[in-house]
Image: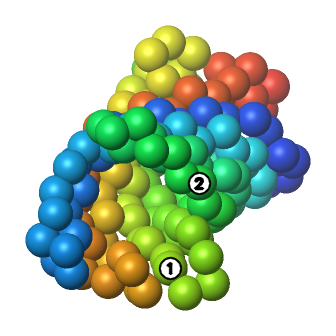
Amino acid sequence: MTEKRIFPTPLMAILLLVVSSAQAAESGTVQATIPWDGEGQVYQVSTDTIVFMGSLKGIIYVESAKGDMNEGFVICPVMQQLDLKNGTTQAVGHCEITASPDDVLYAKMTCKGKFGGGGCAGNFELTDGEGKFKGISGSGRLRVRSPLRAIAADLA
């Protein structure tokens, strides 16, 4: 099994979430952007398959339908598989989003797609929260853009 270390690589995620808060019984739609860096290990697990295991870190910028803008820190351990023969990819990750020391969101992300093309598209689901986010739920579309084609070509 071949292993290579990947140092910070720029990535971008765009989210459109429908969010509900149990505390305030409010619901709404927000749009979020996360410019983040990915860092981790890449393993060749077959002649046509490589797997990235690492983390994505960055700042999330969230805009509500009312135009309010908020931000927080995000870290997501992820595992992404790339099929070099078909040019496809799929990923799963879990995220911690920290707005303040007492206000934290937890989420799960999944995506599939073609690398070098439309990115990895899927779902971002809020699974839990602390502080003002206790009882929060919601989900929405996710699209991750990254230079995976160049990384995969280098590794192949």
**Residue 24 in sight in this render:** yes
Q: Mark 2 or mark 1, which is nearer the start of the sequence?
A: 2
Q: Which mark is residue 21?
A: none
> In x, y percent, where is residue 148?
65, 28
Q: Amino acid at mark 1?
A: Asp
> In x, y percent, where is residue 94?
46, 66
**Residue 15 in sight in this render:** no
Badge 1 density bin: few <14, some 14–19, many ≥20, Cα 10 Å: some
Task: In this rendered view, identify the residue nearer to me: 9 or 148.
Answer: 9
Question: What residue is rendered at 66% in x and 52% in y?
Answer: 59
Q: Quarter of the image holding residue 153?
A: top right
Question: What residue is rendered at 47% in x and 34% in y?
Answer: 14
Q: Quarter of the image holding residue 31?
A: top left
Quadrant of the image for the C terminus? Answer: top right
Q: Quarter of the image holding residue 24?
A: bottom left
Q: Is residue 145 left or right of residue 137?
A: right
Q: Which mark is residue 71?
A: 2
Q: Amino acid at mark 2?
A: Glu
Q: Is residue 2 left or right of residue 114?
A: right
All told, the count of numbered labels is 2
Compared to residue 146, the image places residue 34 above or below, namely: below
Quadrant of the image for the N terminus? Answer: bottom right
> In x, y percent, where is residue 123?
30, 45
Task: In this rendered view, identify the residue nearer to me: 125 or 53.
Answer: 125
Tag 1 secondary structure: strand
Tag 2 secondary structure: strand
Badge 2 density bin: few <14, some 14–19, many ≥20, Cα 10 Å: some
Find disc 1 in the rendering and name its residue. 103
> In x, y percent, where is residue 45?
60, 50
Compared to residue 151, the image places residue 68 above or below, namely: below
